[in-house]
Image (cartoon, rainbow, N blue to C red):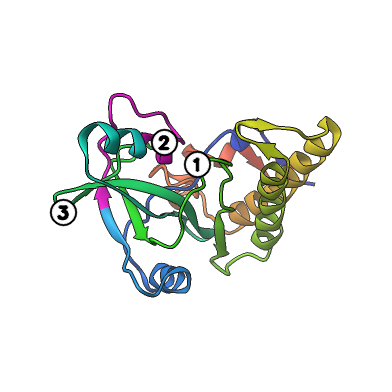
Amino acid sequence: MPAISTDLFKKNFTTTPESLNSAIRAFCRDINPKDDPVYLPVAPDAAAVRSECFNNVAAKVAIEGGTLVYGWLIWEWPRVFVEAEHHAIWEKDGTLVDITPAINGEQRILFLPDPTQTYDFASQKRRINIKRSSGVFSSVDGWIAAADRLQQAIEDNSTGNQVTLERSYLSALGRDIQNSLAAVFVDLARATRPNDPCFCTSGKKFKKCCGPLVQLYP
């Protein structure tokens, strides 16, 4: 049985797509065919809080004017999946800017405007991320399903910023995600040669990056 280091699970693998390829364009059209995705700069506001885009932009509008623009952040993990995360950016005088600090320090984002997808500031309920497998590995479907179950459980059992879930149930959901993600890691490792670029998109060779963290034949 393959052995996977716990360090691998601590990494974040999604980032801004390098280009608008046909798969990403099709994904965006299925979400909102009326608008096109655009690359935007990330210029974090001094008062902005990570992962709180809606409140960040609302506060910015209240102080400096402009408009809150709803839509989706488009993320990609090459060979694995693409993802749309409900998001908001700031628009003023025709200029669009993402004022929320990016999780991995990205300097630009791919944003799909979608004015119909508003945010309920009263309930603070979040929309479930939209995910689509790249179709390379069948294991990705199981991981996506597990991730969706966890996010849905959190939203179903949250009031404002408070989440009430039995610890045992939350642990079970977490194990499902870890086990299904491990299967994805194994498939990626088997399909990546030592001198290939690492599947974590670090730019390093696989053997110098995540390769040692996945032992296919321990």
> How far is the residue under mark 2 from the one under mark 3?
21 Å
Majority secondary structure of magenta residues: loop
| 50 is within the stretch colored magenta | yes
Cβ–Cβ under 8 Å for marks 2 and 1? yes
Left or right of 160 on screen, residue 65: left
With respect to residue 211, does 22 lie above or below?
A: below
Q: Mark 3 or mark 2, which is nearer the start of the sequence? A: 2
| 28 is within the stretch colored magenta | no
Cβ–Cβ under 8 Å for marks 3 and 1? no
Query: Label for residue 177?
Result: none
Q: Mark 1 or mark 2, which is nearer the start of the sequence? A: 2
Q: Position of residue 25 (x, y in %)?
A: 38, 71
Q: Position of residue 111 (x, y in %)?
A: 34, 55
Left or right of 154 on screen, residue 72: left
Q: Position of residue 79 (x, y in %)?
A: 51, 61
Q: Position of residue 192 (x, y in %)?
A: 54, 55
SS label for mark 3: loop
Tag 3: amino acid: Gly
Residue highlighted by disc 2: 55
Q: Which residues are magenta?
A: 40-56
Say few, some or many: other residues with alpha carbon within 10 Å of mark 3 (under 14 / 14 to 19 / 20 or more): few
Between label 3 and label 1, give the one nearer the viewer.
1
Which residue sits furthest top? 47
Residue highlighted by disc 3: 94
Q: 180 and 126: which one is in front?
A: 126
Residue highlighted by disc 1: 121
Left or right of 177 on screen, residue 28: left
SS label for mark 2: helix
Q: Mark 1 or mark 3, which is nearer the start of the sequence? A: 3
Q: Residue at x 28, y 60 (%)?
A: 38
Say few, some or many: other residues with alpha carbon within 10 Å of mark 2 (under 14 / 14 to 19 / 20 or more): some
